[in-house]
Amino acid sequence: MTYFIVFFLLGLIGGLVAVASNPAPYFAALGLVLAAGAGCGVLVGYGGSFLSLVLFLIYLGGMLVVFAYSAALAAEPFPETWGDRSVVVYILVYMVVLGIVGGYLGGGWYEGSWIVGDGMKEFFVLGGVSGGVAMMYFLGGGMLVVCAWILLLTLFVVLELTRGLGRGSLRAV
């Protein structure tokens, strides 16, 4: 089980580096999908299967809307790919910085923290999933409003950043 969680954590880091290093929204959206899937895989590894499913569906739905708008407004004829020299340099710099910071700050944190959420389920009345669902419905109303506001704000920020001087997709009008 530990190997799966390490695999998902490496996929999460790889997806975040793919988003941060690529200026084209087409390939950055693929990195976001990879990061969302790997993050939900980590949650499943720790016993939050329902929460990871809900987060994956909501996150991909919100990301799909933002990606559709940004791809429509930032229509580049030849977007930069992951094989271009500038993107490869960014990827290498981000990976080296993450390796240095992780090696400096992460000394010994992994020795006792690999216990899964339902590892001692015979001692609990409710499983981790049912308790998490109850807490999400009980305390999650305010957080739902905050997340909806953040998604709306992110949509406007992405639209403003991708609009440019040529007014995006309205250039032909």
Image (cartoon, rainbow, N blue to C red):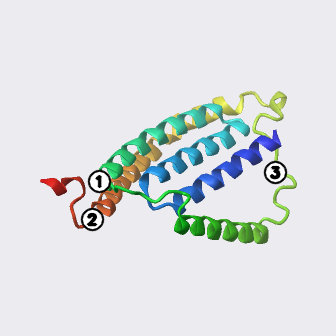
Tell us which disc is closer to us: 2 or 3: 2
Q: Secondary structure at mark 2?
A: loop
Q: Amino acid at mark 1?
A: Leu
Q: Label 2, on which residue?
A: 164
Q: First in sequence, mark 2 or 3: give its number.
A: 3
Q: Residues within 10 Å of mark 2 (few under 14, many from 20)?
A: few
- For the N terminus, give its image quadrant: top right
Could you give the CA–CA distance between mark 3 and mark 1, rounded to whole angstroms? 44 Å
Tell me the residue that label 1 is attached to.
73
The span from disc 2 to disc 3 (Cα, nearest Å) is 47 Å
**Image coordinates for residue 99, horizontal then vertical, percent:** 73, 67
User: Label 3: which residue?
Assistant: 113
Q: Amino acid at mark 2?
A: Gly
Q: Residues at badges 1 and 2 in contact (C-beta under 8 Å)?
A: yes
Q: Are marks 2 and 3 in contact (CB under 8 Å)?
A: no
Q: Name the residue at 66% across, 31% down.
A: 129
Q: Position of residue 148 (x, y in %)?
A: 39, 46
> Secondary structure beneath disc 1?
helix
